[in-house]
Structures are given as C-alpha cells and as structure tokens.
Image (tube, rainbow, N blue to C red):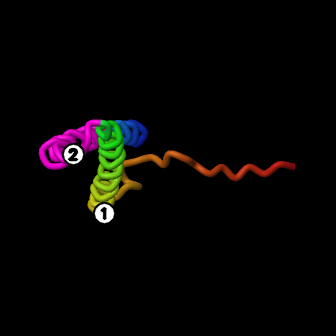
Amino acid sequence: MNKKFNTILFILGATLFNVIIAVISFFLLVILCGRFIFPRIPDTSYSWAVSLILLASIAISIFVYRAVLKFFLNRIDVEQYFDPLFVKHNIRRQ
C-alpha cells in the first residue's frame, strides 16, 4: 500500500470512528436523561432536551476524537506512512 491509499483509509476510518462515537454518546445520553431527567421535566420540554443531547453528543465525539487522534499521532511517524493532504506549490509567475 502506498502513502495516498493509507491517507484515504485513515480519513475514512477516522470519520467512521467519529460517527460511531457520536451515535454511542447520543444513545448513552438519551438513556441517562430518560432515566434521571425526563421524568422531572414537563412534556413540552422533550424536544429541547433531545436537541441539547444531540449537541452534547457531537461535542463529546469531537473531544474523544481529538484525544484519540493526539494519542495516535504521538505513537506513529505520520510522514512515514501518510501523504500530506494539501501541498503548497511555489509557482512563480513571470
């Protein structure tokens, strides 16, 4: 496998990991709120609570993703296995 293919696989895997973490945290927060918070709030506030749960699950997935990515980048040499996504080309116009 070459560096470009490794980079594409890493991006796809990292995106899938982020989505999975978001879904898992959403369901965990819904279960926790359903058990402890939903019985105490009025019926008209459920939509606000679910909206806040969705935002919280996105925030949790971002924080977990950043922590795992930082750990991963400290463990391996990125330049050895991955191609840069954006390459700066110095083109002189004359």
Q: Nearer the viewer, residue 40 or 49?
A: 40
Q: Which mark is residue 74?
A: 1
Q: Does residue 16 show up?
A: no
CA–CA distance in space, label 1 to label 2: 30 Å
Which of the pair 56/40 is nearer the observer?
40
Task: Indicate the position of residue 17 as horizontal and vertical percent values.
Answer: 28, 41
**Amino acid type at mark 2:** Leu
Q: Looking at the rendering, which quadrant does residue 68 occupy?
A: bottom left
Name the secondary structure under disc 1. Answer: helix
Relative image position of residue 20 (x, y in whole percent)? 25, 38
Q: Which residue is mark 2?
A: 29
The residue at the point 74 percent across, 49 percent down is 91
Range of residues picked out in magenta? 17-43
Q: In which quadrant of the rendered image does the N terminus lie?
A: top left
Kind of residue indicated by mark 1: Asn
Q: Secondary structure at mark 2?
A: helix
> Hey, which residue is sitting farthest bottom in the picture?
74
